[in-house]
Image (tube, helix red, strand yellow):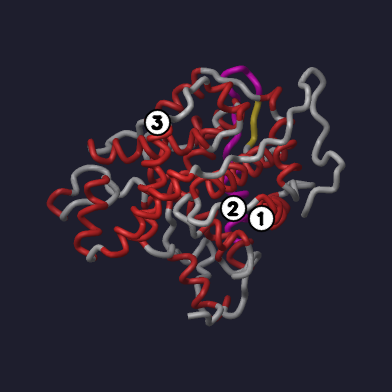
Amino acid sequence: MGHTGEPEGPALPIGYPPQPVWVPPGPTAVEVLAGAAAGIGSILAAPLLRDRMLRTLGVLPGPPSDRSGPADPVRADRAPADPGPAGRGPGPQGAGDPGWFGPDSVAWRVHADPSIFVAGVAAFALQSLHPLALAGVADHGSFAEDFFGRTQRTGMFVAGVVYGSSADAQARVDEVHRVHERVIGVAPDGRHYSANDPDLLEWVHVTEYLAIAAASRRFGLIPLEREALDRYVAEVAVVGEAMGITSPPRSWEALDRAFQGFRPQLAVGEQTRAGMRLLADPPGLTPAGRRSWGLIWAGALACLPPTAGTLLGFRAPRAGELVACRSLLMALGAALGPPPPLLAARRRLGLD
């Protein structure tokens, strides 16, 4: 959906003057050149050398005898081609069904890009700014105890609705609603929360796809163009509708205004600060893994809208960190290849 010249999305709250539409920045020329060099080097390397490079970066486990610590912190965000909650995989039930998106969609391109690694971390950072959303995670989740397992499950849902058959995508949404029925409680400020509250569902939708689009525009192999931002937001509105959001944003401007509309509800309390410490330095990483994760974290901070950056009070990532982050992502993308859910979807459609 293109620009109409008229404001889109909800009216901003009184006392919060409207801000110019924030458009995520693209990569610098230095970032692009460094990323290209890293990707080409990874493609040219032999498979064994690629594995050694990934272990050095801390994103592949060592030999079986060395697997005493956490393995694969970055691969955790690239979901496997699991059969889905209804047991529907790329078998006869879904054969020929393009699902909710299909191979010509912007979403298929965006979610196959290694920038999705950064996007997941940025989304968690954004979502932690809402006290009620964060209380549900803190009270009912296992984020601190099973950080990479939680990120992988989230990645499996996101990849599943993008690449799965229509039936599988709906089954995943239904499963999330069933899980959310148990996520109710009282936040530290005394307010009651429910994960199925339409307001919280909209917050998660807005922040999730804002982060993915911003990461794709900054770190994507082919950075997301401005017009493609609108197309992407319009496409993923189908997920918002399935989740129960009455009127999900259908353009980038509407998405940005929706995010601004949440400003009065955002706060940085102790739970948020604890969440940020966990995101910045997940437990159990090896020294090499911690260095790699630091680059992913820097990239995630670069994808946050100004309002979020101001609330969190983090320094802006240094130029060198962003160059290194893009190089890491391009090397990972070249070494790991297409994500399994995409390959499964292509087989389902007879494209391979």
What element does badge 2 sit on?
loop
Measured Cα–Cα span from mark 3 to mark 1: 30 Å
Could you tell me the amino acid type at mark 1?
A: Ala
Residue placed under numbered mark 3 in the picture:
280
**Mark with earlier residue (3, 1):** 1
Measured Cα–Cα span from mark 3 to mark 2: 26 Å
Is 107 covered by the magenta stretch? Answer: no
Which residue in the rendered view is the most extreme toward the left?
65
**Mark with earlier residue (3, 2):** 2
The reply to whether discs 3 and 1 touch (Cβ–Cβ < 8 Å) is no
Is 186 covered by the magenta stretch? Answer: yes
Q: Nearer the viewer, residue 201 or 9?
A: 9
What element does badge 3 sit on?
helix
Regarding residue 181, the answer to whether it shows in the image is no
Q: Nearer the viewer, mark 3 or mark 2?
A: 2
Identify the image quadrant of residue 253: top right
Q: Could you tell me residue 230's position as x and y percent?
A: 71, 52
Left or right of residue 35: residue 87: right
Q: Could you tell me residue 12's position as x and y percent?
A: 80, 28
Looking at the image, residue 269 lies above or below residue 335: above
The reply to whether discs 2 and 1 touch (Cβ–Cβ < 8 Å) is yes
Q: Nearer the viewer, residue 132 or 207?
A: 207
Left or right of residue 180: residue 292: left
Residue placed under numbered mark 1 in the picture:
228
Q: Crowding near pointer 1: few (<14 within 10 Å), some, many (20+)?
A: many
Residue placed under numbered mark 2 in the picture:
224
Q: Which residue is drawn at 70% across and 56% down?
A: 231
Q: Could you tell me residue 120's position as x and y percent?
A: 49, 44
Identify the magenta region.
171-191
Could you tell me the amino acid type at mark 3?
A: Ala
